[in-house]
Amino acid sequence: MASRITCRILPLLKTSNVSQLTFHRTTTSASAYDLQHKNPFAKKVIAIPKAEYGGRHSVTMLPGGGIGPELMNYVREVFRYAGVPVDFEECPIDPQSDGNEDLEYAITSIRRNGVGLKGNIETRSLSRGILSRNVALRNELDLFVNVIHCKSYPGVKSRHQNIDVMLIRQNTEGEYAMLEHESVPGVVESMKIVTAENSERVIRYAFDYAVKHGRKKVTTIHKANIMKLSDGLFLETSKRVAKDYSGIEHDHMIIDNCCMQLVSNPHQFDVMVMTNLYGTIVSNVLCGLIGGAGLISGRNYGDHYAVFEPGTRNTGTAIAGKNIANPVSMLNAAVDMLDHLGHSKHASLISQAIDKTINEDHVHTPDLGGQATSIDVVQTIVKHIQDLTKDKNWSLN
Amino acid sequence: MAAQLVRKAFSSAVPMARRYSSEVRTVTLIPGDGIGPEISAAVQKIFAAAEVPIQWEPVDVTPVRGPDGMFGIPQAAIDSVNKHKVGLKGPLMTPIGKGHRSLNLALRKEFNLYANVRPCRSLEGYKTLYDDVDVITIRENTEGEYSGIEHEIVDGVVQSIKLITEEASRRVAEFAFQYTKENNRSKVTAVHKANIMRMSDGLFLHCCREVAEKYPDVKFEEKYLDTVCLSMVQDPRQYDVLVMPNLYGDILSDMCAGLVGGLGLTPSGNIGLNGALFESVHGTAPDIAGKDLANPTALLLSACMMLQHMNLPTHAEKIQKACFETIKESKFRTGDLGGSAKCSEFTNEICRKIAG
């Protein structure tokens, strides 16, 4: 029956010609009434608000569970020593609770501040109706793209060196749409949604990013040979958008081939764009190749909000409280956040300190193969910050 | 050992003749496209040299238009595999985005092949960045994300359905634990994403847990897909047997193949209710087809898996040993392994080792 429906819809799809539908994001300051009634396709895109009170930015902090709270403390400590003009508004979320008030408060806070720093939120409630809170947060705030910059650290021993891959993944739909139902007892259906609009947004973001940062090639990762309609739509959209960017090379690869290539030769990739689940897989493989979950940070961007987090979204319950968690991923996320807020001097200061700690001093936590504790790493970073500020005779002007 | 497993998996409706190793059995052979015919010929030659009591029945699975207008596998192929219960398949071509359903998927549905087994072992003599890889990935083969049910709900919104049933999950979990026991493995890891897909992967996990209780001497653990990806590329030695639904299995098994040297070296077996189909999982390589440059190792190792399954372990081990030794000596290596030997030279060397 499904194939009959598909047969009937496919010709319609060809004639309606998706490429003629444009989803122009015209930046407009038209009133809400005008937008709704006169031009429904234009979305009112306002600059991401950055709450600034008395010269100090206010940022929402969601510690999450597992190693989240301790890493957030390290971030506060490093910010204190670096004199960063950022105040955190902390929003804890109780993992056991069945209701969503904590989460809604956190979402309101991010809407107010515009920027958030988050750990991985646990959803330990056993009832089937409660959806993953991380996914709910992303969907609610429409953080449609997740950007992970996978860059090797020279000081970390790994099988491949000099990896520099930009991973751009769709963050709100795809396999994480969380639309599941049990039609008959013992048969569960889970729906993967792919929309042309969201795919186009993410792919345009990828190409714009490539242009802005001087990247040469964008690779679309898909499984369109099996999932012909859904991944087929994503692939078609990327091919169509690629034509608008003549300076950037575009090719595509199937996800299983991609994983195989990643473990043997990750240097062939430059910018990769893909849907949600493949993004999880590829980001974890890349982080594993670079040296572990503790180094890379991820950035979630929407039209209105930005949230920064550790790249591999691990809760780390097994290592919580043991002082062996690697604080670098959260600190890198904090650096990204400072860049976004415009505090580039502070950002580069902390980033240099982290670089020195990992590459020169080789203060590595156990996940990188070393013996240091988290506190050791943080103290070394703080020491470098103090040295750097002393040397430069550094002022904010 | 594997034959006992197969007998358990078969329904008892069809009484099977006792297998004597002296009796010559017929096996369906699907040569495939591209380099398929030449590597199938290589395998046939090696089997003849090893005097394996098997005769081959080649069939063609190019889709034909059936009476209802839909493309399907020709009836002759279906009858052949149903009769002989065991098949060996070369690489088949799947066009992207066309109207046909994937041929591989169609074969799986037709013969009810519910579990795909892919052992990935590091080959001595072929150095990759990962030594000591010894992982077996068992993936559910009929449903999951590859159910092929997709619709366009509204213009620009496409929905693809991932189907998980209790029956299929339980079947593949049973198979995984039995296989683990028969092959003296110690640990089964269920790979899932139940924190996001709570109902579907939750059901899969539930079935795995139930079956795990029946095998108390096999260790069972459950891990998230991202954790497995992360730790697999850092240290593959911590995993033994992995069991998972369709999509994750596809990706992870290919990744494990990449760890040991690529799809050109990895065997694969599909176990079903009505028989078993062993195949090589690499592509058709149309660029080197017909030039005697192909590497028959994958198909050969799959054929050895098939011999194990058919309760002919001595022949299987003999051929495998010859193959591994040839690769280890590195005098006759094909182009994909970094050598310059032709397919026929590689084949002849293996035949020589078997005879000598």
Image (cartoon, coloured by chain):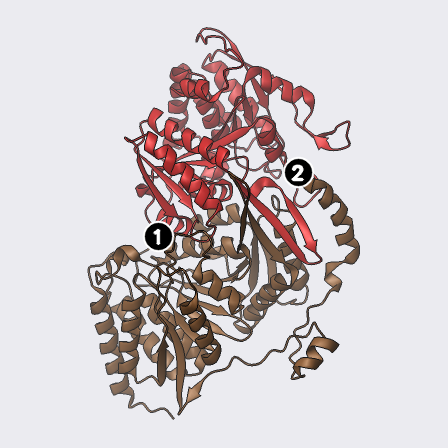
In the image, what residue type sits under mark 2? Arg
Q: Residue at x 33, y 83 (%)?
A: A84
In the image, what residue type sits under mark 1? Arg
User: Label 2: chain?
Assistant: B
Residue B341: x and y, percent? 49, 32
Q: Colour of chain A?
A: brown
Instruction: State the SS at label 2.
Output: loop
Residue under disc 1 on the same chain as residue under disc 2:
no
Q: Specify the quadrant that holds the N terminus of chain A.
A: top right
Alpha carbon separation for disc pair 1 and 2: 39 Å
**Label 1 belongs to which residue?**
A159
Query: Which chain wears red?
Result: B
Camera-side residue of B175 and B81: B175
Q: Is residue B114 left or right of residue A125?
A: right
Q: Residue furthest right?
A: A15
Q: Residue at x 46, y 75 (%)?
A: A108
* Quadrant of the image occupied by residue B127: top left
Residue A371: x and y, percent? 19, 59
- What is the crowding at mark 1: few (fewer than 14 residues within 10 Å), some, or many (at least 20)? some
Camera-side residue of B138 and A361: B138
**Label 2 belongs to which residue?**
B101
Residue A255: x and y, percent? 53, 49
Q: Specify the quadrant that holds the C terminus of chain A.
A: bottom left
* Quadrant of the image occupied by residue A29: bottom right
User: Label 1: chain?
Assistant: A
- What is the crowding at mark 2: few (fewer than 14 residues within 10 Å), some, or many (at least 20)? some
> Residue B123, can we see it?
no
Camera-side residue of A285 and B196: B196
Residue mark closest to the camera, 1 vs 2: 2
